[in-house]
Image (spheres, helix red, strand yellow):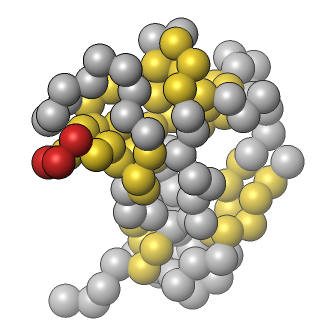
Amino acid sequence: MLLLAASACGSPAVRDRSPKPDGVYEEFNVTMVAGGTCVAATRTQFECPPGGTCQAPPPKAVACPAGLAEGETVRLVMTNDLTCNVEGIATPCPEHDEGPVEVPAE
């Protein structure tokens, strides 16, 4: 399955959403920030249309995985069945991303 993500980069960015043979659908870095809340940033590389300048969507709030301390980061894996885990332990998934976002001109 291909996901066409609307972007402000000039035209839709194409992202392959086909099931992966290794079972990993998407990966995130989850970090506990000040106040004991966690954010998830995608590890996926986005391709921008020719001539566009894009970056991944901003980090999203997510439930903190068990045992994570402030300032620590862990790898969260979303599998092909759209469930998530940290080192094999089930954990809530971050919200679906909306694709790349435009980088403001300098």
Tell me what residue is drawn at x 85 percent, y 48 percent.
1
For residue 21, above or below residue 18: above
**Residue 36 in view in this figure:** yes
Identify which residue, 4 or 65, lies in the foreground: 65
**Residue 29 in view in this figure:** no
Task: Please tell me in which quadrant of the rendered image residue 74 appears.
Answer: top left
Tell me what residue is drawn at x 51 percent, y 67 percent.
100
For residue 12, above or below residue 47: below
- In the rendered image, residue 72, in percent from the top left (x then y), is placed at 19, 29
For residue 34, above or below residue 85: below
Q: Which residue is outermost to the front?
A: 35
- Tag count: 0
Tell me what residue is drawn at x 59 percent, y 66 percent.
98
For residue 3, above or below residue 87: below
The answer to whether 33 appears left or right of 56 in the picture is: left
Identify which residue, 93 or 14, lies in the foreground: 93
Task: Please tell me in which quadrant of the rendered image residue 12 appears.
Answer: bottom right
Q: Which residue is outermost to the right?
A: 1
The answer to whether 9 appears left or right of 80 in the picture is: left
Tell me what residue is drawn at x 67 percent, y 68 percent.
5
- In the rendered image, residue 101, in percent from the top left (x then y), is placed at 46, 74
Q: Which quadrant of the figure contains the C terminus?
A: bottom left
Identify which residue, 45 or 92, lies in the foreground: 92
Q: Which residue is outermost to the top?
A: 88
- In the rendered image, residue 75, in percent from the top left (x then y), is placed at 39, 26
The answer to whether 106 appears left or right of 22 in the picture is: left
